[in-house]
Amino acid sequence: MDPAYVSAFAALAGSAIGGATSLGASWVTQRTQVIAQQIAHDIARREDLYKDFIEEASKLYADALEHDKADTSKLVRLYALVSRMRVLSLPAVIESADRVMRAIIETYFGPNITLRELSETVKARSALDPLREFSEVCRGELQRLTLSRG
């Protein structure tokens, strides 16, 4: 074989290998960026969902402490938020959200409390915080997602 052909073939092979390597590196980089963006978007969606649930549940819990009748439309909104969690969240978050829902409904059936009674309960540190466990479970889930991103 002619040495000119060998060197031309070697040059072409080197160019092809270099191009393939560059293309592969670009594909891997692009794929990693897309995955990171998807995880960041998922985290943001969950944060918004959990924030909405906490705000709505807090309002309903306060209402339940003061009233015997629940505003059904507000309870339905809270149920809708839990249903959205069923699509996005881990089972621990959903179970905790269900416990919050039950606590709110049970509070409506309990005796109403005055601001003075609430103040005394808070001072005695015997006040129940139905959202504490939910918040902690959500924080854990979001931390796991953040760690999987990095």
Image: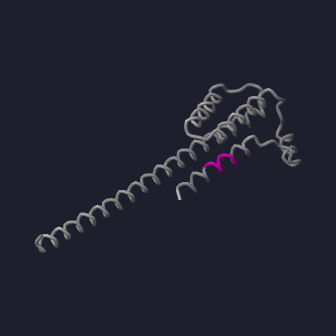
Q: Residue at x 86, y 48 (%)?
A: 125
Quadrant of the rendered structure where residue 71 is? top right
What quarter of the picture does the N terminus occupy?
bottom left
User: Is 78 above or below relative to 129?
Assistant: above
Magenta span main SS: helix
- The foreground one among 136 and 131 is 136
Q: Residue at x 61, y 52 (%)?
A: 144
Q: Position of residue 93 (x, y in %)?
A: 65, 41
Given the current orientation, which residue lies at the most extreme front position? 1
Q: Residue at x 60, y 50 (%)?
A: 142
Q: Position of residue 143 (x, y in %)?
A: 61, 53
Q: Position of residue 29 (x, y in %)?
A: 39, 59
Q: Which residues are magenta?
A: 136-141
- The foreground one among 123 and 39 is 39
Q: Is residue 63 magenta?
A: no
Q: Residue at x 53, y 45 (%)?
A: 45
Q: Relative to 18, is 70 on the left or the right? A: right
Quadrant of the rendered structure where residue 98 is? top right
Q: How many marks?
A: 0
- The foreground one among 38 and 116 is 38
